[in-house]
Amino acid sequence: MSSVLEVDELSVSFAGEDGRMTTVVDKVSFKIGTGRTLGIVGESGCGKSVTSLAIMGLLDPASASVSGTVTFEGIDLRRESESRLRDLRGDRMAMIFQEPMTSLNPSHTVGAQIVEAIQRHRALSRKDAEARALEALRQVSIPSPETRFHDYPHRLSGGMRQRVMIAMALSCDPKLVIADEPTTALDVTIQAQILDLLRRLRDDTGAAIMLITHDLGVVAEVCEDVLVMYAGEVVERASVGTLFRAPQHPYTVGLMGAIPRMAERKPRLATIEGSVPNMRALPAGCRFSPRCPFADAQCRTMPPPIREVEAGHTTRCWKAPLESLVA
Amino acid sequence: MTTPILAVESLSKHFVVRRSLFGKPLAQVAAVNDVSFEIAPGETLAFVGESGCGKSTLGRLVLRLIEPSAGTVRFDGADIGALDAASLRLARRHMQMIFQDPYAALNPRMTVREILSEPLMLHGIVERENQPARVAELMRLVGLKPEQAARYPHEFSGGQRQRIVIARALAVEPKLIVCDEAVSALDVSIRAQILNLLSDLQERLGVAYLFISHDLAVVKHIAQRVAVMYLGSIVEVGEAETLFASPRHPYTQALLSAIPIADPGGAANSFKLEGDVPSALSLPPGCAFHTRCPHVAPVCVEQRPVLSAAAEGHSVACHRWHEIAAPDGAGRAETELSPTLERLIAAFGPRAA
């Protein structure tokens, strides 16, 4: 399988007020193949959004120090010039953010904004670019696209704005779409429509999608593979089916127990005690050990390596396979 | 049935969105439209619905933080709309509110001790010399360490801040707490802690919750009864178990089918809603849901359906509910977890409340 995106040992550190560096993304590696959807899940501050910004080269070099390699369709992005990256962004790699209103310019019509994006990357006449923009609006199932084309963003609902963002992202046939919490700000019936749309577009265009979310439900709905992040590290990676059936990292297990289930009502939810560690004072050993019910002396002193428990399923846990803990 | 702690009757709230030069209202939004319900002592009634359905306005009306356009709110037998400012303040002692953003709800210049002592002083609940002991007790009750009383809100994490807000609400020994998206801003693992805490407190103190949320799975977990709102009106209300197992209103069915469930092998969502919620500025005639309803009939466009009993304790506002088949079984649900995974999850059992 050829990968569209290959990330190898990507690390990001930020300088604090006192000049000390804090590593917020620590040696993250993964690949995404053509037409695949990889979900990246984790709670606030786990480094999932910073990872995506680092891949796109959108972090300010003055404050963030990035290391590792990012290969997109054979191009080593970290060695490319800023102007070359600008050519790639919005063209062969596109990004969709959580809040469409802040990503759209309020003083231009949505049509003009999509046309601008197309003309930035394609040598098309205004007329052809407009036709392409209309086509993109149609692709994302916006009703009466000819009318919407001339609307300003504030005239559209949240779901419609997110569709416009997706239309813009798709207007240049990207090979990679990074979607950072694309449905978090939307109502549940609108979220279902947008997730449906993402699934359909992946199947139609063969683009690879990297979907960043805090919602395991969203992952189960649209992703094939999933990466779980905790405190800046990848702690588990598996296919979606495997991860939900037999998770191999205690953090993933805890997360699954903490979601209220529709199927049955438990009087109490499982809770992961405490809160995420301060990235400036990480615990020795495994970063999850202070909150892990299975942790022992080894976990508290030695950081676990990432290990493969079965083909395609890796975990950063000394105790894996976890079945042995409750046998 | 015991006397309800809260009885709301035909409550409506219209906001004027545009006025003429002389102040004559030109356009109105019916945020809450003829809503009636009751909450028993120690019970949780949840209101679910999407943005703009009026659920937050409803919470504010119940506490009389805003004045209703019509209808009455009776709290513990007293009509709170008829109270003067002084008696309203007394009544508010027994009704508290918890908001979504705990940081915005806490004064950053006050320590936790000051935050928790203020309501005690204001309502003269405990003698001055007993206040420190009561503050410590409140902190323990919500799972905070009394040693942290001298700290400021910014020194706590989001989940801990929400615990402070809950402790403050409990300080006055309320009979009803309105929780407006109280866990929506929290991460999954922290959300579970706060939900467990709310359940524990209800069990121990017998407080009733009016729980406002957009998250159906959370609502199913926490509430005994659930009311589904659409464009200012209750479209369906019933016991949580029944309502989730056999939703009768097409909107409830659509909502349930739209929830992403954490199970890749689970049943696919079969029923999708097209389009957006119509503007509350110009409500559709008849049933407000008819513009998106797959079962729409001529009567739905002409007549506004009223809530009527579909079964004991289960009401639905739909002209055609008895013709629409309830989805079979439990609707959308996850497949069962493997026994191994259940045992692993059990290791995360609550150690401290």
Image (cartoon, coloured by chain):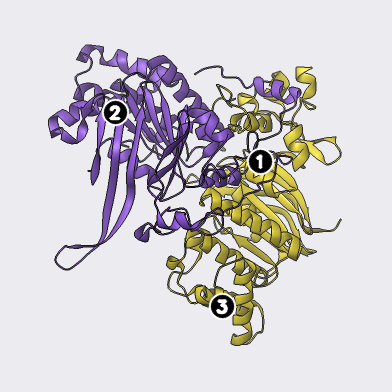
Chain colours: A yellow, B purple
Disc 3 crowd rating (10 Å Cα; few below 14, some 14-19, many 20+) is some
Mark 3 vs mark 2, foreground winner is 2
The residue that label 1 is drawn on is A229
Query: What element does badge 3 sit on?
Result: helix
**Taking the image as drawn, is residue B41 in sight?**
yes
State which tag comes first along the sequence, 1 or 3.
Answer: 3
Residue B28 shown left or right of residue A292 in the figure: left
How many numbered dots are placed on residues in this image? 3
Amino acid of disc 1: Met
Residue B95's disc is: 2
Amino acid of disc 3: Glu
User: Could you say where residue A217 lies in the image, as x and y percent from the top left?
Assistant: 63, 42
User: Could you say where residue A87 lies in the image, as x and y percent from the top left?
Assistant: 66, 73
For the residue pair A62 and A43, the one nearer the viewer reads as A43
Give the quarter of the image for residue B123. Answer: top left
The residue that label 3 is drawn on is A116
Amino acid of disc 2: Met
Structural distance between the alpha carbons of marks 3 and 2: 54 Å
Q: Quadrant of the N terminus of chain B?
A: top left
